[in-house]
Each structure stands twice: as structure tokens, then as C-alpha cells.
Image (cartoon, rainbow, N blue to C red):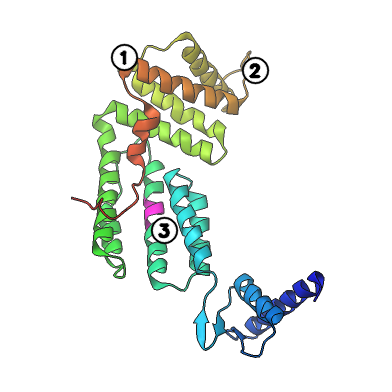
């Protein structure tokens, strides 16, 4: 069989699966003992690409479980970088590709955790913490297929994150790091201009605690303030041309470096306090 004919056969099998699904069936493909090798391979590929179970010698196989696990790991990685949209996309894919009950519960767990971390990052800067970690902890407890040490670890993480958010009020460096993280989250969303306000908030907090801005940092702060006033109609366009994206990155790096020199704090590192630690055997809470 020629290559084009082979892929035509794969597509024909996939179309048949689609028609049966449209008719309300739950189709599966089967490789029988008398199938030719080419036909068997075509059915295997069609089963994987159609997300359809494949039966071989009476055993039902799901060929997308490894893809589901890969999407789950990518969701975890996205959450580590506060990319909540991408994390949910990968979690949705993992759920669609898997038939494993344990993985489905882990997907459910990380949907909870992603939403909670997002609530930490997007909390109202003007008000105190209003999160309810115990509600989330109760939902984690209902995931009964997960090992108890794993559930206890993530319950502890949720409480730690809530405490970190609440602790901003008493720790200016932590408050600045939280604003800094909100700016980094804007970078992840490819919306660098939205990073300017949280960066200015971080600067203001640290300026009240002894930050002595070098000339370069002071100029970036001034440009950012002028640009924001112009955007809201409260001032003229800055005389010095400044691309918002480039300005945001310059302000980010300069503020991080100045805070370390003057106050001994690396905001990029301290902001990690508002990130989720992943569970591994041996790092259980307590």
C-alpha cells in the first residue's frame, strides 16, 4: 500500500468513528487476529487520533493515557509560572484524553489549586485577604483516590498561600514582592503594559522603607507615571518616546536589582512565596 493510500485508510476509519459518535454511539475499534499488518497499524493510529478505545485480543486499551499525563505535567509547569489560562487548557486536555480515575482526580485537584493561586495573585490590592482556604481544603479531602499524604500536603500549601497573602499587611518586602509577582503575571499573559501599575506599587512600598533609586530606576519610574497619566487623560504624552513593553521590562529589572542592593531582597525570588510547591513523596506537610 502506498503512503497516500495508507493515510487515506486512517482517515476513513476516523470518519467512521465520527459518524458513529454523531449517531449517539460510543464506538471502539478492534484489531482482530486476521487483520493485515497495514490495517492493524491504520486502526491503531486512528484509535489514538480519534481518542477511541482499541480492543486487541479482548483487551480494551486507551492509547491516549501517555498524552493525558503529558498535558497534566504541562499544566503543573504552567501553574509554576502563574500562567493560569495555559494551566487550565492543559488540564482540560488531560481530562479529555484519560480514562484513569486517579489522573482525573489529580486534574480536579489542580483545577482547584489553579483557581486558588489565581485568586491569591489577583486579590484586591486595597483590601485584606478574603480567601477561604478551609473551603478548598474540604474539597481536596473529597478526592478520595489520592493518597492521604498528597492531600495533606496540598491542604497545607493552600493554607500557606493564604497566610502569605494575609502577611503582606505586616511585611512591606512581602507586599512589594506580591505586586512584583502581579507584574510578572502580566508578562506571562504577554500584556507587558499591564505590568506598569503593579511595578509602580512595588516601588512605592519599597521607597517608604529606604529604597534609594539610582538615576536609571528613577527615570523609568517617572516615565511609567507619565505614560499612565497620559493613558487616563490626566496628562500630556511623555516627551520621551517610551514603548510600554520595553519600559515595563526595564522597570522590572531595575527595581529588582535596586531592592537587592538597598534592602537585601530579591523581589523575583521572594515572589515565589506566592507560588505553589508541587508534591513529591518525602516532602509531606509537617
Q: Choose the circle earlier in sequence order: 1 or 2.
A: 1
Where residue 20 sits, quadrant-wise, is bottom right
Q: Choose the circle earlier in sequence order: 2 or 3.
A: 3
* Disc 1 to disc 2, C-alpha distance: 30 Å
Q: Choose the circle earlier in sequence order: 1 or 3.
A: 3
**Nearest the camera: 233 or 153?**
153
- 212 part of magenta stretch: no
| 172 left or right of 216 in image | left
Where residue 46 sits, quadrant-wise, is bottom right
* Disc 2 to disc 3, C-alpha distance: 42 Å
Q: Look at discs 2 and 3 and give the one toward the viewer.
A: 3
Q: Main secondary structure of the magenta part?
A: helix
Q: Any mark on residue 38, and which?
A: none
Q: Residues within 10 Å of mark 3 (few under 14, many from 20)?
A: some
Q: Which residue is mark 1?
A: 210
| 193 left or right of 158 in image | right
Tell me if label 1 and label 2 are in contact, CB under 8 Å. no
The furthest residue to the bottom: 34
| 173 left or right of 257 in image | left
Q: Which residues are magenta?
A: 111-116
Q: Residues within 10 Å of mark 2 (few under 14, many from 20)?
A: few
What residue appears at the point 55 percent right and 84 percent down from the top-left corner? 55
Q: Height in image: 221 above or below 78?
A: above
Q: Any mark on residue 111, and which?
A: 3
Q: Height in image: 74 above or below 18?
A: above
Q: Any mark on residue 241, and which?
A: 2
**Mark 1 residue element:** loop
Q: Name the spot of residue 138 as percent of width and height, x first.
A: 26, 62
Amino acid at each position: 500500500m502506498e503512503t497516500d493510500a495508507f493515510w487515506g485508510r486512517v482517515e476513513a476509519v476516523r470518519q467512521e468513528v465520527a459518524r458513529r459518535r454523531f449517531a449517539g454511539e460510543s464506538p471502539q475499534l478492534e484489531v482482530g487476529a486476521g487483520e493485515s499488518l497495514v490495517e492493524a497499524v491504520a486502526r491503531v493510529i486512528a484509535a489514538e487520533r480519534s481518542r477511541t478505545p482499541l480492543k486487541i485480543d479482548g483487551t480494551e486499551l486507551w492509547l491516549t493515557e501517555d498524552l493525558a499525563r503529558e498535558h497534566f505535567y504541562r499544566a503543573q509547569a504552567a501553574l509554576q509560572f502563574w500562567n493560569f489560562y495555559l494551566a487550565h487548557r492543559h488540564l482540560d486536555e488531560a481530562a479529555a484524553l484519560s480514562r484513569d480515575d486517579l489522573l482525573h482526580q489529580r486534574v480536579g485537584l489542580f483545577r482547584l489549586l489553579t483557581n486558588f493561586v489565581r485568586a491569591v495573585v489577583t486579590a484586591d490590592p486595597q483590601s485584606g485577604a478574603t480567601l477561604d482556604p478551609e473551603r478548598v481544603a474540604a474539597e481536596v479531602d473529597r478526592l478520595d483516590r489520592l493518597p492521604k499524604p498528597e492531600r495533606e500536603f496540598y491542604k497545607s500549601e493552600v493554607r500557606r498561600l493564604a497566610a502569605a497573602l494575609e502577611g503582606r499587611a505586616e511585611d512591606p518586602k512581602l507586599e512589594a514582592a506580591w505586586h512584583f509577582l502581579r507584574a510578572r503575571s502580566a508578562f506571562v499573559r504577554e500584556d507587558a503594559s499591564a505590568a506598569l501599575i503593579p511595578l509602580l506599587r512595588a516601588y512605592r512600598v519599597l521607597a517608604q522603607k529606604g529604597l534609594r533609586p539610582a538615576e536609571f530606576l528613577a527615570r523609568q519610574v517617572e516615565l511609567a507615571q507619565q505614560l499612565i497619566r497620559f493613558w487616563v487623560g490626566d496628562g500630556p504624552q511623555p516627551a520621551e518616546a517610551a514603548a510600554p513593553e520595553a519600559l515595563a521590562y526595564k522597570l522590572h529589572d531595575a527595581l529588582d536589582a535596586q531592592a537587592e542592593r538597598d534592602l537585601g531582597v530579591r523581589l523575583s525570588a521572594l515572589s515565589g512565596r506566592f507560588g505553589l510547591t508541587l508534591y513529591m513523596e518525602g516532602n509531606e506537610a509537617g
